[in-house]
Amino acid sequence: MLEIRDLRVSIEGREIIHIDHLNLQSGSRLGLVGESGSGKTMTVKAIAGLLPDGTKISGSVKFDGQDLLSLSDREFAKVRGNKIGFVFQDPARSLNPMMRIGKQVSEAIRIHTDLKGSAVTEKVIDLLGQVQLPDPASLLRRYPHQLSGGQQQRVMIAAAIATDPDLLIADEPTTALDVTVQEEILRLLISLSEKRKMSLLFVSHDLGVIRFVCDQVAVIYGGNIVESGLVEEVVSNPLHRYTSALLAANPGMPKDNNFSAFMGKRLQTITGSVPAVGKFPSGCRFRNRCQHVTDECSSIPPTVTTESNHQYLCWNPSSGGAS
Amino acid sequence: MLKHTLRSLFTLIFTALVGSVVVFVLLRQLGGDIVTVFLGRDAAPIDVSYMREELGLNQPLIVQYLDWIRGIFTGDLGKSYGMGYDISDELMRRLGPTLTLTIGGLLVSVPLSLALGTYSAINAKKVRSSFVDVFTQIGIAVPAFWGGLFLVLIFGVRLGWFPTSGYVSFFDDPIQAFRSAILPICALSLGVTSVFARYVRTAMLDVMNEDFIRSAMARGRTRRSAALIHGVRNASIPLVTVAALQFGQLIAGAVVVENVFVLPGIGRLIVTATLGREVVVVQSLALVIMLIILVLNFFVDIAYGFLDPRIRDKESANA
Amino acid sequence: MPNSMETTQTTPSQQNGRRLWNRLRRLPLTLYIGGGLVSLFVLVAFVSFFWTPYPPNSLNLQNRLAPPGTPGFLLGTDRAGRDVVSELMLGARNSLYVSVVSTIVAMSVGAFIGLAIAGSKQRIQGPLTRFVDAGLALPGILTALVLASKFGPGNTTATLAIITWQIPVAARVTIGPARQILALDYVEAAYSYGRSKSYVLKRHVLPNIGPLLIVLGSVMFAAAILIEAALAYLSVGVQPPTSSWGRFLNETQSLLEAAPYLMFFPGFSIVLTALGFNLLGDGLRTVLDPQQSRSGLA
């Protein structure tokens, strides 16, 4: 239901994102994983129509058949919050400290539907219950600072699913939360997605978390999707060198449902950092940090290779791929 | 909330006290004798001692101070030695023009600066906001008295639309009152609006960068409606603090504008008294004005406590 | 790679020149306009010490109210026959004097107080800051009037009044940033070496708020110019025979019918000078601290 084709985003003449294609089926959960600066947040902004002024964007982002990029600001605003819901990273800052909780959760309802008055209130109470907040009715008139971080994020989620969207985009929703609370929130997202048949685009830097939540994954580096496919497939048989490096930095990821085992125990970090925009090296963007770089990698940017739904962008992939 | 109110009250009282002492000591003790200042150096000793007796200058300083403060509360501010009027009576008589001017100035400048500042912030990257910026930049450089003169020249002298001086009470003749109040209020508002609009712009820009604005847009608001519905309320917190400071500027502007347009208000009174070296009058008037400003600030402080729910809850911490 | 037969060689000095030009080009416009106006003002004021077209106060009653363009009087004369250009220049000198003195004193004392408050114990910082805030609320004109009633009008009174009014401003603006710097880790480290509070304030805080103070100085200067003019207009400031823009403006008020153009000369002088300092302050702020988007007081 979400199809991204040849998406290119440029700022001041420099291309920062180029996504050849990315698919998300209805009801499935796709994880977008990458380090800071890899372009994952920009991609989310591009899909949401929230890119800053002066950004050039081309390509197509088809949502339910409609090309979002062709929409005007106003039309885009009709889709956001209505068919697509958003959950952001730091709930304390993402909620208006001066507006009551009830009002913020009902905001999307009031904008996109004709519901009024007590019908809205009922819906809000119901939503707050669905995100497992106790005593929802008393929360309506509270302010965000009166809640804990985990509760605040639940409120954000309630606000995001208020209009029963088909797609929920979550950008690092648990990164700013306490470790003990993270698992609950993730389980909540999974259950909501399953119960409502709602697709989930989950953005994170933590491959372990993505593995816990999602069934598909796309690895983004330097604005490119360097590998994508089913989560289990990619994790057990990583083809792009960056993916393998990421996995090596996250040892101990058993396949069972034990969340604490997923907590990133970084033993081996990948040396260097993501190159800044416009300073990508020639050829493959990862080549300066890759342990297995070849001459071809340095001169020609790799093209997409597909093997039964497992795609990668590498001249010298790990075992299993064609060289 | 209570703690906050008490703190504001304490600041008010403390500052008023210190201010009054400073004014009093300054005027009574330093730089020579009040009487000599007024009568001149060649005054006959008998006149000097008579006046000193009249003004109670032979009493101990503390007594003088307490008498003065007591007078403020009982409404007896003394008399003008030079012109013979009772100060508090005169103050009341002149309240009308000054109030018309200041309240009119507030009514014009607050909405105008909110509108201009918000407009400028929402359209920050576009050319349109530059016009507002240029306008406010010039506005803060134009002194109220020149702006007033300019308005007098164009609308009073050249076009003859409005009177160039004088005050008509609203109760006597509303139309004329309005006509004679327009130019002074405009002159006063130009500077205040420009200064405040710039603060509004900054506060709104800061707010626009906040994450919850992004959340509002993510729920389906356009940039403009997110700014108006979420931004304004949050921006008003720092603005309220700044607004309090603007009262002083408003009153200072009123003093000047009253002199430009020859309005029989408190501003003109205090200037005339100053030029006439009437220390007693100036002393009391200055304190009254200072108290008014401090009290206004106090109320603004309380309002601040109401606006920000985080302050309200600070003492009664929940969850 | 381009392969041209004639390679243009640039000398190192040419390259440096081009680099400088590029950097100059990126400076904000406000800096240039403001800088230009300020330089003009300072130049005129400075020159007036040595030369004015006509000596100060040369009354010339035969030529009173001569319009601009009258031979010998570029901008005309005022109601006592004084040459307008000379009056403007002398007015600039007066404004410069009052503003320089008041800004320097107010900023020094104010910054000192601000630093002292920032470095004082937590418990008294709050009340002290609020006290400064209260001082901020009181308008300068009031102080000037109070002082003038006792000590008489004049430049000294005006300067004193401006100083008293601006000290809380300077103090308030320094408190915030000073506190932020004092809370930084490397400052804490300095304490652990045994450095005293005043050492830290002098060596760590002061240099870091330097740019802020420069910007503040420019803005305070503009305010001083406006207040000096206002006081002179009210006859509470500088007295005759010293020339001042404010007093000049006052005189033009009664001449609005006879010589309406006259009010523009002192008026524009005041506006352009104040504008210049404000723009300069804005430009400096953009250059010295591009991240700062907050207003200084709120």
Image (cartoon, coloured by chain):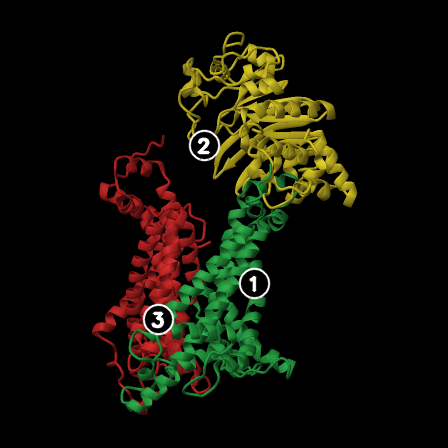
Chain label for disc 3: B
Towards the viewer: B246 or A231: B246
Are dots 3 and 1 in contact, CB under 8 Å? no
| Kind of residue at badge 2 | Val
Q: What subunit carries mark 2?
A: A
Residue that label 3 marks: B25
In the image, residue B130 above or below residue A130: below
Quick one: label 3, few (<14), some, or many (20+) residues within 10 Å?
few
Cβ atoms under marks 1 and 2 closer than 8 Å: no
- Tell me the kind of residue under disc 1: Val
Q: Nearer the viewer, residue A323 or C255?
A: C255
Q: What residue type is labelled 3?
A: Val
| Label 2 to label 3: alpha-carbon separation | 66 Å
Chain in yellow colour: A
Residue placed furthest toward the top = A320
The residue pinned by badge 1 equals B110
Q: Which of marks 3 and 1 is in front?
A: 3
Residue closer to the observer: C254 or C186: C186
Q: In this rendering, would C223 be left or right of A86?
A: left
Chain C drawn colour: red
Sequence-wise, which precedes: disc 3 or disc 1? 3
Q: Which mark is residue A277?
A: 2
Whether pointer 2 and pointer 3 mark residues with C-beta atoms closer than 8 Å, the reply is no
- Residue C40's quadrant in the figure? bottom left
